[in-house]
Amino acid sequence: MERTSGEVPGVLEQARTPGPTIEGTSDLLSLADRVKFAGERPDPENCRRAIDSVYEIVDATKPADEPQTVEERGAA
């Protein structure tokens, strides 16, 4: 929350976020900035695409499940 839209891609690169996810995040933030600061009003189709992009970004950046230990696999 303390970063500008322009600073976010660099932070994502440092976190080793995949390139397509960084690009998608930048595009989404750019759209949000245009809505917030320039008063743009995206049409319903673009709103739907933005929501889909958010889901893709969240899915791409979820922490990986930790591998199970032998004991945990045996208990399942």
Image (cartoon, helix red, strand yellow):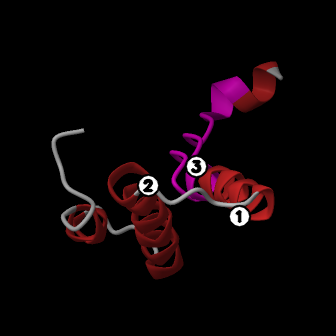
Quote the CA–CA distance across marks 1 and 2.
15 Å
Label 2 element class: loop
Specify the amino acid type for callout 2.
Answer: Gly
Between residues 6 and 55, which one lies in front from this camera angle? 6
Specify the amino acid type for callout 1.
Answer: Asn
Specify the amino acid type for callout 3.
Answer: Val
Q: Is residue 36 left or right of residue 67?
A: left
Q: Is residue 49 left or right of residue 42?
A: right
Say the numbered circle drawn on residue 39: 2
Quote the CA–CA distance across marks 1 and 3.
18 Å
Quadrant in the rendering for residue 57: bottom right
Q: Is residue 12 left or right of residue 68?
A: left
Disc nearer the start of the sequence (1/3): 1
Vertical arrangement, residue 47 with respect to residue 6, above or below: above
Q: Give the residue displayed 78% in from the left and 19% down from the top.
A: 75
Counting from the top left corner in percent of width and height, residue 36 is at 39, 49
Q: Give the residue displayed 58% in from the left and 56% down from the top.
A: 41
| Label 1 Cα neighbours within 10 Å, binned few <14 / some 14-19 / many ≥20 | few
Q: Give the residue displayed 61% in from the left and 52% down from the top.
A: 54
Quote the CA–CA distance across marks 2 and 3.
26 Å
Quadrant in the rendering for residue 44: bottom right
Q: Is residue 67 magenta?
A: yes
Residue assigned mark 1: 46
